[in-house]
Image: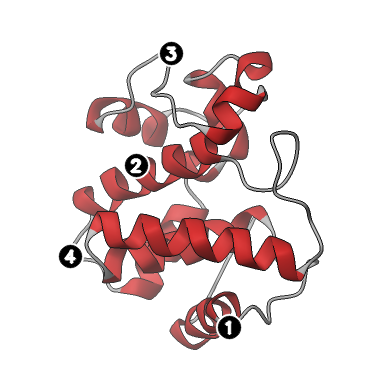
Amino acid sequence: MEVSYTEDLILKLVEQFRTKKLSKEDWTHHAHLIVAVWHIKNYDFFEAVCRLKSGIILLNDFHQTENTSKSGYHETITIFWANAIKLYISMFRELPLEQLVNNFLTSNLSNKDILFKFYDRANLMTANLRTIYEAPMLKELNELAVRDILTENPH
């Protein structure tokens, strides 16, 4: 899939996220990742995570998506992606934002099913992991794991 986001489009998406003006239809997996890359690149990691968590919860509220133990915001998934993106950015920190985002989105690492290399699907969807972060159970998320994913042949 060919993906190409200009810096202007990235900044517009981030601004729509921050002001809760991003439509539910546009709040896609890629949009989540773009917003996360921008935050993690532009803030200290913990500040970025706080802003992402509160932003997702508020945007869900705006979309009338309930944030409960069964729907809406998912703590473990959010922190997993934040950590994966932090590792990716640390490997390619010299890249400008536009190239960083586009390279990430076209990499194997952006595949939403990557989670299941690290978590059992049924366990990941429990109320416990939705509300409280738990580190990966099947495989450690580290730079080696990220490098392996980036060099895998797509299915």
The label number, if any, that marks residue 19 in the structure image: 1
The residue depicted at 38 percent of the width and 15 percent of the height is: 139
Which residue carries the number 3 mark?
A: 137
Q: Position of residue 129 (x, y in %)?
A: 55, 26
Which residue carries the number 4 mark?
A: 94
Mark 4 vs 2: CB contact within 8 A: no
- In front: label 1 or label 3: 1
- Choose between 73 and 150: the one closer to the eye: 73
Q: Amino acid at mark 4?
A: Glu
- In front: label 4 or label 2: 2
Q: CA distance from mark 4 to mark 2?
A: 18 Å
Q: Residue 68, located in which quarter of the rendered image? A: top right
The residue depicted at 33 percent of the width and 33 percent of the height is: 146
First reached walking from the N terminus: tag 3 or tag 4 = 4
Mark 1 vs 4: CB contact within 8 A: no
The label number, if any, that marks residue 83 in the structure image: 2
Q: Position of residue 44 (x, y in %)?
A: 22, 62
